[in-house]
Image (spheres, rainbow, N blue to C red):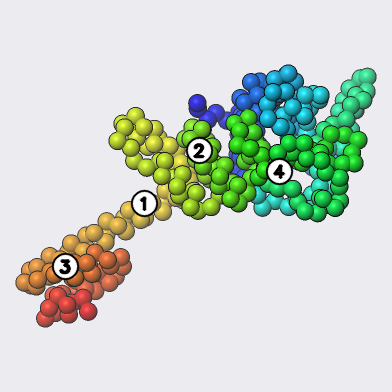
Amino acid sequence: MRFSRSADITSAVGNLEGFAKQTCAEEAPRFTAGSAAWHRPPEIRLERVQADGYLRVLRPDGLAPLAAPWPAACDHDEVLVEIKMAGDHVDIVELQRALLRRQARQVERVEGREPRWMGEEPLWVVAPHLPSWLHTARALERFAPGCYRVGPSSFQFLWIAANELPLRDELVSFLIARSGQALDEFARWVAPRRDVEWVISMLEYLPMSSKTREDLLRRFARSDDPEIEARRQLILQALLADSPEVKEQLIEKGIEKGQLTEARAALRRVLALRGFALTAQIQAQIDACSELATLHRWHDRAVIAASAEDALA
């Protein structure tokens, strides 16, 4: 599978939220067999009162057999979705803002139809976990792993705790909001199930642990298979093209490495010409030196020193 970016959302992929929306745009239609699709919403006429996006229900019968929360969308033609990634605030202020954005969408739908739309816009909040304050502020009903109905409410209001969701392909749109150890678990599980380009994006955006990131990066190590290695090289070239500052750093490191190699070789030549024995200890000391100025100083001293040990003292 090629990781193709849809035109209406490509511009958003440049930050963590953009990656979340990108994944929803691709995962929702793929793993619901076209039963649901992600849409980037138009800006509501209320000074940037704009939700993250909404899921348009295209075929309710295709959602019914999937893992929760998907079946909860069967009775609706649209679900407003708020995504709170790891590190985002999930306090009472953010909840009220989410409710405001939901209400704004409700008004927009009522105003945009004749005869007037009489439905109620559902709201799904996706976050890593269920915040403790919500237990005291609202009535909660757990109806599936990681899925809670929030009340009292005149409309469908669900809180989806990504850390509690099972690892299922059709839930990746929600699982990307995981945090901590649960995120590491998800990253290791999903990596072999997606293509290289998607995994690279995940490694770039999701705040998993360094250990997990390093383990997954080993998937891109040099391969003896020419076809796999060719793809790897193309991916690395694309990444460097998108990150000129990293490319410049690599170039500088390459130049520095070459200068160090040349300086070590020159030092050994002078020591050998002086007739000094290059013991294993001297060789190791030269190899361990990563400062060009020090190697140059040793080189100059080796011209007049009484021994190799004196030159490198």
Query: Spatial distance from mark 1 to mark 2, Cα to Cα?
Result: 30 Å
* Mark 4 lies on residue: 161
Q: Nearer the viewer, mark 1 or mark 3?
A: 3
Q: Which of the labelled discs sits on residue 280, or is there none?
A: 3
Task: Using the rendered image of the protein, determine whether residue 136 is visible from the camera's viewpoint.
Answer: yes
Residue at 30%, 65% (x, y): give it: 290
Residue 233 position, x and y percent, is 37, 37
Taking 65 as reference, is 157 left or right?
Answer: right
Residue occupying image coordinates x 73% and y 18%: 61
Task: Work out whether residue 42 or residue 29 is closer to the camera in this orientation and state it.
Answer: 29
Identify the residue position indicated by label 1 in the image.
251
Q: Is residue 147 above or below residue 256?
A: above
Element under disc 4: strand
Q: Amino acid at mark 3?
A: Ala
Give the mark nearest the N terminus, 1 or 2: 2
User: Toward which corner of the image does residue 218 lie, by quadrant?
Assistant: top left
Kind of residue at badge 1: Ile
Task: Give amino acid for label 4.
Answer: Ala
* Mark 3 neighbour density, 10 Å: few (under 14) some (14–19) many (20 or more): few
The first of marks 3 and 2 along the sequence is 2
> What amino acid type is highlighted by mark number 2?
Ala
In the image, which is nearer the foreground, mark 1 or mark 2? 2
Q: For mark 4, does the 10 Å Cα neighbourhood hold few (<14), some (14 to 19), or many (20 or more) residues?
A: many
Do we see residue 17 in this rendering?
Answer: no
Q: Are marks 3 and 2 in contact (CB under 8 Å)?
A: no
Q: Position of residue 78 (x, y in %)?
A: 79, 27
* First along the sequence among labels 1 and 3: 1
Q: Which residue is mark 2?
A: 191
Label 4 or label 2, whichever lies nearer to me, is 4
